[in-house]
Amino acid sequence: MTASPLGISLGDPGGIGPEVAVKALAEALRQPGSRYVLFGAKSVYDEGRALLDLELEVKPWEGGPLPEAPGLYLADPGIPSGPVVMGGPSAENGRASFLWFEKAVEAAARGTIGAVVTAPVSKTSWRMAGLPWRGHTEYLESLYPGAIMTFWSDALNVALLSHHLPLKEALGRVRKVHLLDFFRSLHRALAARPSGVREILVAGLNPHAGEEGLLGVEEADEIRPAIEAAAGEGIPVDGPFPPDTLFLKALGKPGTLVVALYHDQGLIAFKTSSFHNGVNATLGLPFIRTSPDHGTAFDIAGRGIADPRSMLEAIRLAGRFAG
């Protein structure tokens, strides 16, 4: 673990976020010298802890310098309005999860914490609350343009050119200028963290990466020229490769990162290989933000059966990158 304290936001209080956060912290706190700051309502934390019958000492923190002593601290901004709705989305849940996340980001921007680990939020809850952002990454992009959504596991590493966009809109981003700017930003972000990435492999857009123009021209007109220009600048990027075989080529290679050109092109492969231990990390920020790669799982919320492995890996990756 890093010496810097890590912040953890509890996510949508009606989902499995508080549960997986408590379960993961029970394991993470075994690491000597570790410090964590929870951002969320104490009542929600207490419910998660009681559900699991776990005893985790948590000390209140009301801002200012964080104590040097290892342990678990709680920054409690409260619940903005209304009761928590368990097992489904609501405006109340959306306002609460956003407030906790916002406070964690503010602490990271001040340098009080070295990273933000976010338990899952509901995009529907955020929309019901009137928030203009689809999720964590979009909010971070509004503060730090150029933020990059990436996914990490022992099996596969993936970066997304675009993420939560309708497919038609996402395909409009596949242009040389945008791709080249993305490769530069990704290279800088990877160089700033101990990522271990040595090569970046880019997926084609069309079947068989266009088959030399027989199945599409984007590879020849947009993607390959951007790759060649980036490689000419010393960026270790190659491609485009047929997307139906590229992920197999990168599987099990921790020094390889695949660039997918839209959300599902990358996430189908990633979640198939790494659903239970994959981590979503936002790069290109002055701090690290990670999250489990699953959602709120409203259907099993409050039952105590949620798998915490992805949340625990998110904490571990945050510590590694922040360090």
Image (tube, rainbow, N blue to C red):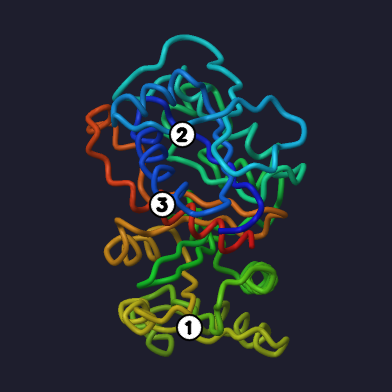
Q: Residue at x 40, y 16 (%)?
A: 84
Nearer the observer, 234 or 9 = 9
Return the mark for residue 240: 1
Earlier residue among tags 2 and 3 = 2
Vertical placement of residue 266 versus 164, above or below? below
Disc 2 marks a residue whose amino acid type is Gly
Nearer the observer, 270 or 72 = 72
The local crowd at label 3, few if under 14, some if 14 to 19, many if 20 or more residues have their Cα within 10 Å, is many
Q: Residue at x 23, y 33 (%)?
A: 300
According to the picture, the residue beneath numbered tag 3 turns out to be 312
Query: Element type at marker 1?
Result: strand
Instruction: State the separation of the CA atoms marked 1 and 2.
Output: 37 Å
Indicate the quadrant containing the N terminus: top left, top right, bottom left or bottom right.
bottom right
Disc 3 marks a residue whose amino acid type is Leu
Disc 1 marks a residue whose amino acid type is Pro
Instruction: State the separation of the CA atoms marked 3 and 1.
Output: 34 Å
Q: Residue at x 41, y 26 (%)?
A: 13
Nearer the observer, 305 or 4 = 4
**Disc nearest the viewer among 3 and 1:** 3
**Disc nearest the viewer among 2 and 3:** 3
Residue 64 quadrant = top right
Q: Is residue 285 left or right of residue 307?
A: right
Q: Residue at x 52, y 52 (%)?
A: 290
Query: Element type at marker 3?
Result: helix
Q: Residue 172 at what x, y percent from top left?
A: 54, 60
Return the mark for residue 11: 2
Q: Residue 264 at what x, y percent from top left?
A: 37, 59
Q: Residue 142 at what x, y percent from top left?
A: 68, 43
Vertical placement of residue 94 versus 199, above or below? above
